[in-house]
Image (tube, grey):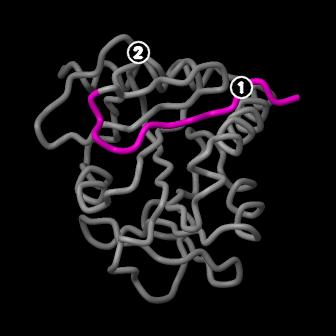
C-alpha cells in the first residue's frame, strides 16, 4: 500500500473516533481562531468549502460569514473543481454528496482574498493530504490568495510526502495550533491570540 494511502487510513480512523461533541467544539474553536486573523478581517471574498461528515464542519461558518463576506464554494464538474458564489436558496447535492451552489461559474479568481481548504491530513510544513483525485491541487494552482488548511488536531502528522504537483498551504489551523508554512511566498498570517 502506498505511503499516502496508509496515512489516509490512519487519519480517517482517528477522525472517526472523535465524538460528535468533540467535533462540534473543534469547529467552534476553529471558527473563532480564523475570525481573529487579519486576513479574515480584511478579506472581502473567501473561497470556502461545504464540509462532508468526515471534515471539520463548515456549515455554520458559511451561514454566518455569508452576511459579512462574499462566499464562494467549489463545485465538482467532471474531473475538475469550478467555483460559484454561495446562494442559500440555490443549493443542490452534487455527485459526491456535497452541497453545491447553482449559478454561473466564477472564472476570474483575482478577487479571492482567502481560501479555506479541507484535507484528509496536513503536516506542520503546510503539506496537504487530499483524497487522491487531485481536484484541489488543480484548482489552487490558479489562485494567488493565501491558502489555509483547517483540520482537527488528530489530522496533523509529522510528514506528508510531497510531489511537484502538490500545492502547499500558507498555514494550517487546528483548534490548538497554528502552523505557518515558512517557504510559502504568499503573505504571512497575523493572528491575534490574546483576545478576551
Q: Which residues are magenta?
A: 183-196
Label 1 Cα crowd, 10 Å radius (few <14 / some 14-19 / many 20+): few
For the point 76% across and 70% down, which residue is it?
Answer: 67
For the point 62% across and 34% down, which residue is it?
Answer: 191
- In this figure, which residue is indicated by the disc labeled 1? 193
Instruction: Tell me the element at label 1.
Output: loop
For the point 36% across and 71% down, which residue is it?
Answer: 109
In-front residue for pair 195/22: 195
Residue 85 horizontal/vertical position (percent):
54, 77
- Residue 141 located left or right of residue 165: right
Distance from label 1 to label 2 (Cα)? 24 Å
- In this figure, which residue is indicated by the disc labeled 2? 157
Residue at the right extreme of this rendering: 196
Residue 90 horizontal/vertical position (percent):
63, 84
- Residue 54 located left or right of residue 164: right
Q: Which picture quadrant has residue 35?
A: top right
Label 2 Cα crowd, 10 Å radius (few <14 / some 14-19 / many 20+): some
Instruction: Tell me the element at label 2.
Output: loop
- Residue 165 located left or right of residue 76: left
| Chief SS of the magenta region | loop
Q: Which picture quadrant has residue 24?
A: top right
1 or 2: tag closer to the N-terminus: 2
Amino acid at each position: 500500500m502506498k505511503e499516502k494511502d496508509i496515512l489516509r487510513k490512519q487519519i480517517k480512523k482517528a477522525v472517526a473516533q472523535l465524538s460528535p461533541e468533540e467535533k462540534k467544539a473543534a469547529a467552534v474553536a476553529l471558527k473563532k481562531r480564523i475570525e481573529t486573523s487579519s486576513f479574515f478581517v480584511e478579506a472581502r471574498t473567501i473561497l470556502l468549502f461545504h464540509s462532508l461528515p468526515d471534515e471539520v464542519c463548515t456549515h455554520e461558518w458559511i451561514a454566518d460569514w455569508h452576511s459579512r463576506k462574499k462566499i464562494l464554494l467549489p463545485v465538482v464538474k467532471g474531473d475538475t473543481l469550478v467555483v460559484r458564489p454561495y446562494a442559500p436558496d440555490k443549493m443542490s447535492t452534487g455527485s459526491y454528496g456535497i452541497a453545491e451552489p447553482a449559478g454561473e461559474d466564477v472564472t476570474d479568481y483575482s478577487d479571492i482574498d482567502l481560501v479555506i481548504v479541507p484535507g484528509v491530513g496536513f503536516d506542520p510544513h503546510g503539506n496537504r493530504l487530499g483524497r487522491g483525485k487531485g481536484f484541489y491541487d488543480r484548482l489552487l494552482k490558479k489562485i494567488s490568495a493565501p491558502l489555509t488548511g483547517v483540520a482537527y488536531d488528530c489530522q496533523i502528522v509529522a510528514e506528508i510526502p510531497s510531489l511537484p504537483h502538490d500545492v502547499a498551504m500558507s498555514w494550517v489551523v487546528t483548534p490548538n495550533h497554528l502552523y505557518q508554512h515558512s517557504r510559502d511566498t504568499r503573505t504571512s498570517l497575523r493572528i491575534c491570540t490574546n483576545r478576551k
